[in-house]
Image (cartoon, rainbow, N blue to C red):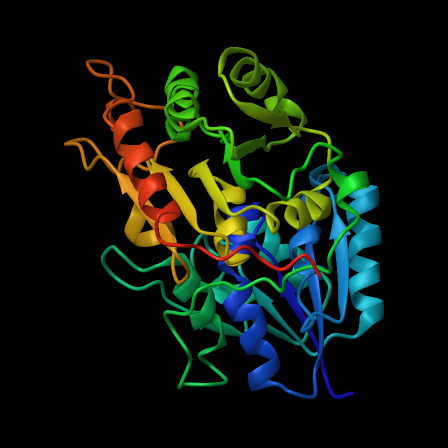
Amino acid sequence: MGEKILVYSPNWIGDAIMAVPMVKTVKQVFPEAALTMFCKKWVAGVYRFLPEVDDIITFTRKERKARHTRSRIIERLRSQEFERAFILPDSFSTTRLIFQARIPQRIGYRDQFRSLMLTHRLSPRAGTGWHRSDKYMHVLHPFETELPYGLAPRLEAPPAPDMAQLCPKYNPDKLVVGLNPQAVATSRRWPIPNWIQLIDMLAASEIQFILFGGPNDQERSARVAREARGDIVDMTGRLPLQDSITLMSRCDLFVTNDSGLMHVANALGVPTVGMYGAADVRITGLRGNIYRNINANVYCSPCVKNTCPNEKEPLICLTSITPDRVAAEVRDLIASDLSRQPDS
């Protein structure tokens, strides 16, 4: 094994997925290197599906902030004797931590007064529309000028799970549609009544819906499951990320708010319908596999704000996306004679 490389992961699941092409390319640029991901615990499940990753070091936000636990993290990084670190988050604090770990080569963007702590400094592309995956890929530019920009993220399909244990109500004889009515930012949450109406429009005896999300999303999913009709299985908050990814891989279709799970489904190769509100589709839109980026393109979007600033017509970017439009996109994908992933 050659040199030891650290990649400091983005902090959100969707961004971690968009970093996957860069992570895979590290092993092409440095084929003999041992690659370690440094990431928050909640995104570690993403990297466990990548054979290119040799090790994962995790931390929590609290551990990184508290002085005594931060010191332990720094000492652990020092003890690993990494030769270089690629820093994907843009914050000052992430670069400072890697600087304190005394990793000889520190590569990242020069934003937020970080230049003095970086050995290789990159400038963000001027203007707008640079996809985040390509921004992450560009961090490798000091070592490889012919980089594969434009790649779609890909996650290796997990082994066939024991579905009876993972999701006892999963029905392989039906067309399984995963639903994710969740998003951290309110400006990315399609209204719950619209989700209920969409399910009612699609419900049929041969379709099963599975609701996904985290523990904080259970109330939203519970309302959908309670008020919509059809075969609905609510798995919200019941599985860790790695198991959720495995269950998502068994879906035939995934309909979702702009969120981390949207990017996960797309990376798994599951046909995905993603609804965009405040986000800029040019920067975080889906790529590659069978997908639909649904965007109302209203006058105030993309504002890229987590909370809608439009007091006159709040959340018009989302309310302008009708259930009829989403249902039409879903039916179009279903009609495309999609092949179910094999059971083994």
Locate residue 320, reporting x and y percent. 23, 25
Residue situated in front as seen by the camera: 129 or 165: 165
Viewed as shown, does residue 203 lie left or right of 298? right
Residue 91 showing in the rendered view: no
Residue situated in front as seen by the camera: 111 or 85: 85
Residue situated in front as seen by the camera: 85 or 44: 44
Locate residue 26, reporting x and y percent. 58, 77
As displayed, is residue 115 above or below residue 329?
below
Locate residue 204, reporting x and y percent. 46, 28
Locate residue 242, reporting x and y percent. 71, 48
As displayed, is residue 76 above or below residue 82?
above
Which quarter of the rendered picture does the C terminus lie within? bottom right
As displayed, is residue 122 above or below residue 147?
above
Query: What residue is rendered at 28% in x and 22% in y?
Result: 319
Q: Which residue extends farthest left?
A: 299
Query: What residue is rendered at 22% in x and 57% in y?
Result: 127
Query: What residue is rendered at 53% in x and 60% in y?
Result: 88
Residue 257 showing in the rendered view: yes
Viewed as shown, does residue 67 lie left or right of 52? right
